[in-house]
Amino acid sequence: MSTTTRGRPRSFDRDAALDKAMRLFWARGYEATSIGDLTAAMGIGAPSLYAAFGDKKTLFGEVVAKFGDRYGGFVARALAEEDTAEAAVRRILREAATEYTRPECPHGCLVISAGVNTTSAEIADLLRDMRNRNIDTFAARIQADIDAGVLPSHLDARTLARYVGTVMQGMSQAARDGAGRAELERVAEMALRGWGP
């Protein structure tokens, strides 16, 4: 960080500051992360934080978007690139084992864990809506395969989608609790035995 001429605020790299905020929210969650924690991690004062990012909720919204772009894309890629819902889910769960245990990042998924115990209804709703949109996306993909005859007609797309989401949430929490990649890969393989007919 450098200070410009007298009377001007310290300059900072906004993207780098946002990355530091993301890692802090990811590690501690929304509720446990204070403005003081954020300014210390980001290397800026509170007035600069408010000027650059708005309030804590607004900053968190940016953090969630950045997280999705940088770390959450594996789900969308699998759904777009795999030929069947089953292949996409297999890939998603296997890749979740890797994504949730990256050594250079806090473990787990920010969207799954950052809102635990929050008293902010707005934050809880934001994260819940994101998770439920993923379930909706899984269900639509599964239903398309049922309709096309790729999956048996007796399957309940919504329940199967919820199963996938529940496994992902459990894997995220297990990673936060210390489960490693190899263990989560075995969990994913076991969960995939529950897929389909």
Image (tube, helix red, strand yellow):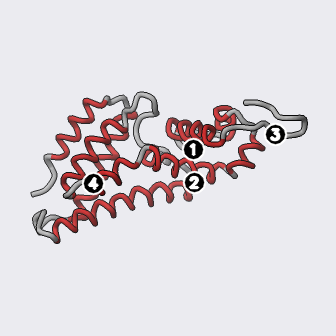
The residue that label 2 is drawn on is 120
Q: Are marks 1 and 2 in contact (CB under 8 Å)?
A: yes
How many residues crowd mark 2 within 10 Å: few (<14), some (14–19), many (20+)?
A: few
State the residue position of label 4.
Answer: 81
Image quadrant where one finds the N terminus: top right
Q: Earlier in the sequence, mark 1 or mark 4?
A: 1
Q: In the picture shown, does residue 79 fall above or below 27?
A: below
Residue 7 in the image: state x and y as whole percent.
90, 39
Give the x, y percent position of residue 71: 43, 43
Q: What residue does disc 1 label?
A: 31
Q: What element does badge 2 sit on?
A: loop
Q: Which mark is residue 101?
A: none
Q: Are marks 3 and 2 in contact (CB under 8 Å)?
A: no
Mark 3, other Cα within 10 Å: few <14 / some 14–19 / many ≥20: some
| Residue at the disc numbered 3 | 9
- Asked if residue 49 lies left or right of residue 71, the reply is right
Q: Which residue shows up at 65% across the image and 42% down it?
A: 14
Image quadrant where residue 9 sits: top right
Which of pointers 4 and 2 lies earlier in the amino acid sequence?
Answer: 4
